[in-house]
Amino acid sequence: MSLFKFDTVAFFGRSLAEYVEMFNLNLDELKGKKVLDCPSGPASFVAEANKLGIDVTGVDPVYENDFESMITHGRDSIELGMAKSMKVTHLFHTEGDPDREIFKKEKLTALNRFSEDYPNGFKSHRYLVAKLPNLPFADKSFDIALSSYLLFFYADTKDGGVIDESTFDYDFHIASILELIRVTKNEIRIYPLCAPNVNDSQSKAKIFVDKIISDLNSRKIKTEIVPVKYKDVRGAETMLRLTW
């Protein structure tokens, strides 16, 4: 049976509209606030949100690469993700888009918007080279942090993620979340909480997420699993909201 696995993290981004659905965002409420997108990848969220008056900073370790190779990496990641997902379409919401062509077009559009914004955005520090669990920001630099498609998703397959023998283990998750807490005033939202694997990956992911939630609660961090509107991975219909 085919599995949805990766050898490493893909450079794969989403749009502002998708961020709204992944994180239940109210864009009007974010205007005038400082938002951290970590990791940001080739998403168009930074570009689109800043045009609306939302001060978003995107960070990603891939930004250390030259522009052309980065964009090529983004296109290759879209093709790879599409090829893998088409082998296991039952793990995804494909209603109305059985061949995932609409999904692919949306990802290419997000990448193109990112590529148009990135050169000037990098110069003006909207995009910064950084990676979890060590971020180059002072304490409480941001009003809110958003983190999508790294934590939980790229965890080890034994924990419900998509990488065998992943380096993104329990200690990495806790250290990364605590670092996001350090640089944020009072709220973090993380999506998704599981990956599209077979072999009961959602049950594995729940055990992993519950363990992390227990650890965070012991540190006086409030946790809430919140339903979201975004539909891609079956079973990934919630985000983790942290407040303190």
Image (cartoon, rainbow, N blue to C red):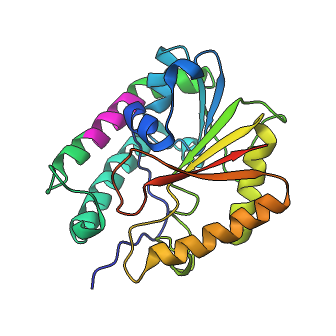
In this view of the protein, can residue 133 be seen by the observer? no
Residue 112 located within the stretch drawn in magenta: yes
At a point 45% along the width and 76% down the height, the residue shown is 201
Residue occupying the point 67% across, 34% down: 144
Q: Is the magenta stretch mostly helix, strand or loop?
A: helix
In which quadrant of the rendered view does residue 43 lie? top left
Query: Does the stretch in magenta take in 58?
Result: no
- The residues colored magenta run 106-114
| Residue 140 horizontal/vertical position (percent) | 81, 33
Residue 237: image quadrant is bottom left
20 or 4, which lies in front? 20
Along the horizontal axis of the image, is 43 left or right of 82?
A: right
The structure residue drawn at horizontal position 59% and vertical position 26%, both measured from the top left corner, is 56
Q: Which residue is drawn at 78% across and 34% down?
A: 185
Q: Where is residue 146 in the image (x, y as percent from the top left)?
A: 59, 41
| Front-lying residue, 135 or 122 | 135
Q: In which quarter of the image is the N terminus?
A: bottom left
Above or below for 19 versus 155: above
Residue 136 horizontal side relative to residue 9, left or right: right
Q: Nearer the viewer, residue 180 or 222?
A: 222
Q: Percent x, y for residue 45?
A: 46, 31
Q: Residue 224 in the image: x percent, y percent?
A: 64, 52
Q: Is residue 103 left or right of residue 44?
A: left
Examine the rendered structure and indicate whether residue 133 appears above or below residue 120.
below
- The quadrant of the image that shows the C terminus is top right
The reply to whether residue 109 is in sight is yes
